[in-house]
Image: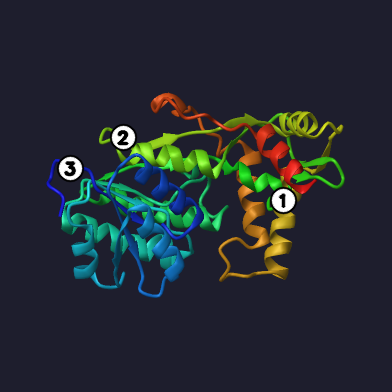
Amino acid sequence: MPKPDETLIILAGATGDLGGRIARILLKKGTPVRVLVRPASKRDEIDALRQLGATIAEVDFDSLPQLTHACQGGTCIVSALSGLREVIVNTQTKLLNAAIEAGVPRFIPSDYCIDYTQTPEGTNRNLDLRREFRERLDKAPIQGTSILNGMFADLLTGQAPVVLYPFKRIVFWGNADQLMDFTTIANTAEYTASAALDPTTPRDLRIAGDVLSPRGLQEAASQATGDAYKLFRVGGLGTLDVMIKVTKTLMPAQDEVFPPWQGMQYLRNMLSGRAKLASLDNDRYPGIRWTRVQEVIARHVQEKS
């Protein structure tokens, strides 16, 4: 086990995209990383992390003694777990309890989203789960820090129905000048790695690689592609509310992490302005080159051509 004055990051969710990026960045910095994995995790992903220099701890997340032992000596727990209540609330609570038992001083939960502290409860299922875990974290004798990064800009390449490439349209509801926050997964991972090594982090860190309105997205897409994109206003936010309700009724998919209506709820929160990050902490860790939305779109179009 590391000595108390040594750095050791305990990482959960490293077999996912974001978690894997966080692990690679920390290891590249020469930081000791202990990855928590379930015995059923894919062996090739585990082997890849081990080859990069990570220490692998296979644990039963339902066993407090096993989790506590795996967290011993850690200076910060970083969670990049993805899922619904069973993961975001229940599994993270087990990880939190283990961190406390092991004496780990800091915990970064799997938030990585818009500012859910400002959105009304009941308007976004996935954010409500993060809000519920936040309440548990805030009551625990440990220093919690959430990374709030808006929407992953990577989703603008097709997963989020905002930039319609075949039709050269930017889809939105409400106000075309409502600002929204976008950050790439890579930038989020780089920032989170830096935050994990910083013992002085506040409760929330807010970042955005780019801040654009639907009108700004129109300009970014036009500049990136060389085509004239146009705005397509479907209706007001009330129209979007109705569409969410209908979609949720026709395609409930309650066991899916990101069903269509969940993405619509997320966009609704952004377009309302309630989830807008009030201030940004981008400059806290110098050296990060923030990727603009225009770059994301240009790279996507180039890869498709």
- Label 1: element kind: loop
Residue in the foreground of this view, choosing between 213 and 75: 75
| Amino acid type at image mark 2 | Thr
- Label 2: element kind: loop
Residue in the foreground of this view, choosing between 136 and 223: 223
Q: CA distance from mark 1 to mark 2?
A: 34 Å
Q: Which mark sits nearer the N-terminus, 1 or 2?
A: 1
- Label 3: element kind: loop
Q: Residues within 10 Å of mark 2 (few under 14, many from 20)?
A: some
x and y percentages locating residue 300 in the rendered image: 71, 43
Q: Which mark sits nearer the N-terminus, 1 or 3?
A: 3
Query: Residue at the location (85% across, 41% down)?
Result: 168
Which quarter of the figure has residue 203? Answer: top left
The numbered mark at residue 243 is none
**Quarter the C terminus occupies:** top right
51 left or right, relative to 68: right
Residue under circle 2? 201
Residue under circle 3? 6
Q: CA distance from mark 2 to mark 3?
A: 18 Å
Q: Residues within 10 Å of mark 3 (few under 14, many from 20)?
A: few
| Amino acid type at image mark 1 | Gly
Q: Note whether residue 114 is visible.
A: no
Q: CA distance from mark 1 to mark 3?
A: 43 Å
Mark 2 vs 3: CB contact within 8 A: no
Which quarter of the figure has residue 248? Answer: bottom right
Residue under circle 1? 158
